[in-house]
Amino acid sequence: MKASVAEIKDLMKSTGVGMMECKKALEEAEGDREKAITILRERGLATQAKKAGRVAAEGIVTAVVEGNVGAVVEVNIETDFAANNQEFKDFVANVAKTVIEKAPADLDALKAAQIVGGDKSVEETLQDLFIKIRENMVIRRFERLEGALVPYVHGEGRIGVIVKLDTDLPQDKYFEVGKNVALQVTSMNPRFLSKEVVTQDVLDSEKNIIIAQMNEDPKMASKPEQVKSKIAEGKLGKFYTENCLLEQEYVKSEGDFDKTVGKYVESAAKNLGGKISVAGFVRFERGEGIEKKADDFAAEVAAMAGIK
């Protein structure tokens, strides 16, 4: 059968798929709209399987708090252009809401959960979105927190942070303090909350690096191992100030270069007349740890044309 213009337009509007593909699907389905949608989804899934090997290092990191529950979520896509698609942005926002409301145990549970704002699972919604955008998309990671939380998103989704506070103050009083700590986490990227939580294996590794550096220095290499070990232990102080949030120099302090983040929070709590301490934080940066493949466009075209 031949699909009518009205039927094709309706299917295009519902699926976001191009005119010719909608026409073919309707004709193959003999005018059955739902069957045509299934055909398009099946074709979309097949295309996505081919694209699954493509590196998706762009995308959005979001940090959302609703009441005393929050989520930091990273969803990747192939290009920054597609990351600006409003439907992709809405999808990421709804995934974060799903994490908050459904409290999934892991990524598999999240993908199987019904997405907030829809009647399908997160995975099925992602597949539907792929049909429209035609780029590989990956829900990479999430973390869910509960308590007195303050979110911050930097650079239109490049970095997402949530800071968790231990406080007896209401949100309108602790929020600014949490926001300032979140800005610190965003800019300085600490590995640990405080020096007390740094594990011994990390310290041993850092100490070994310092000793190895001394062994490369002609003036230090001849010193006894005990001496080098003590010097290395002394230099661990710098490691703490660079890698532990509460020991870091507070970046917003004006003229007070001795003020650490820990001292800032302590001072702010005193001024507000209550208790505030930093209980933890989560920081996701878009694409961190993903090896981006450098595209060779000429080679790709040559390969498509069968040129060696």
Image: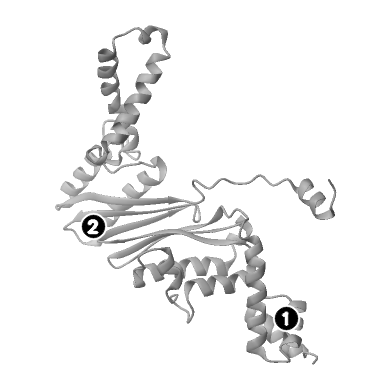
> Which circle's residue, 2 or 1, is located before the other in the chain?
1
Q: Quadrant of the N terminus?
A: bottom right
Q: Quadrant of the C terminus?
A: top right
Location of residue 84 by image quarter: bottom right
Q: Residues within 10 Å of mark 1 (few under 14, many from 20)?
A: many
Residue assigned mark 1 = 22
Residue 115 versus residue 28: which sits nearer the camera? 28
Q: Residues within 10 Å of mark 2 (few under 14, many from 20)?
A: some
Q: Is residue 12 left or right of residue 298?
A: left
The CA span between labels 2 and 1 is: 55 Å
Height in image: 296 above or below 111? above
Could you tell me the amino acid type at mark 1? Cys
The x and y percentages for residue 287 are 52, 50
Residue assigned mark 2 = 173
Q: Is residue 205 left or right of residue 147?
A: right
Residue 113 versus residue 196: which sits nearer the camera? 113
Location of residue 53 by image quarter: bottom right
The x and y percentages for residue 198 are 27, 38
Res. 237 in view: yes
- Label 2 secondary element: helix
Q: Is residue 226 left or right of residue 292?
A: left
Labelled disc at residue 186: none
| Residue at 58% across, 71% down | 129
- Label 1 secondary element: helix
Residue 90 versus residue 122: which sits nearer the camera? 122
| Residue at 40% across, 69% down | 109
Given this view, does label 2 or label 1 mark the residue nearer the observer? 1
